[in-house]
Image (cartoon, grey):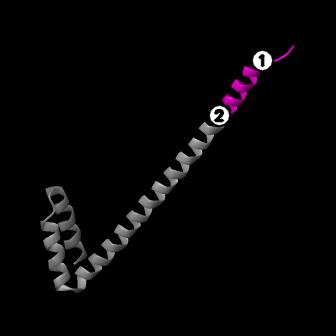
Amino acid sequence: MTTHPLDNLEARKATLLKRKAQIEARIQALEARGREKARKADTRRKIILGGYVLAAARTDKDARRLIADLIASLEKPADRTLFAECLSESL
């Protein structure tokens, strides 16, 4: 029994398409890990900077005033309340 040349091409095409899907899945996983790593770094920067700012507010009257002005400029009342409470706790 002989195989038709197109059968071999279709099998090769199917194999390549499967490999393509696997590679695309690996690329998506790598991109997701990169986004997660960037998000974690951003969160860490915010936490470190926030801690530094709150520490400065404990000892520096000008820093406390600046932070109070920044809190007052927040648009959402819930955010202002959250940070006002945080600032009053740290002083």
Residue 11 is situated, as x and y percent measured from the top left of the image, at: 72, 26
Q: Earlier in the sequence, mark 1 or mark 2?
A: 1
Query: Mark 2 and mark 1 in contact (Cβ < 8 Å)?
Result: no
Give the left or right position of residue 46, taking residue 18 as reference: left
Residue shown at 40%/67% (left/top)? 44
- The residue at which mark 1 appears reads as 4
Residue type at mark 1: give it: His
For disc 2, the neighbor class at 10 Å (few under 14, some 14 to 19, many from 20) is few
- Name the image quarter holding the C terminus: bottom left
Give the left or right position of residue 26, taking residue 12 as reference: left
Q: Main secondary structure of the magenta part?
A: helix
Image quadrant where residue 23 sits:
top right
- The residue at which mark 2 appears reads as 18
Residue shown at 24%/86% (left/top)? 59
**What is the C-alpha distance between the residues marked 1 and 2?**
22 Å
- Name the image quarter holding the N terminus: top right
Could you say whether the residue bearing mark 1 is in a helix, strand or loop? Answer: loop
Q: Which region is colored magenta?
A: 1-18
Residue shown at 14%/79% (left/top)? 65
Residue 76 is situated, as x and y percent measured from the top left of the image, at: 16, 56
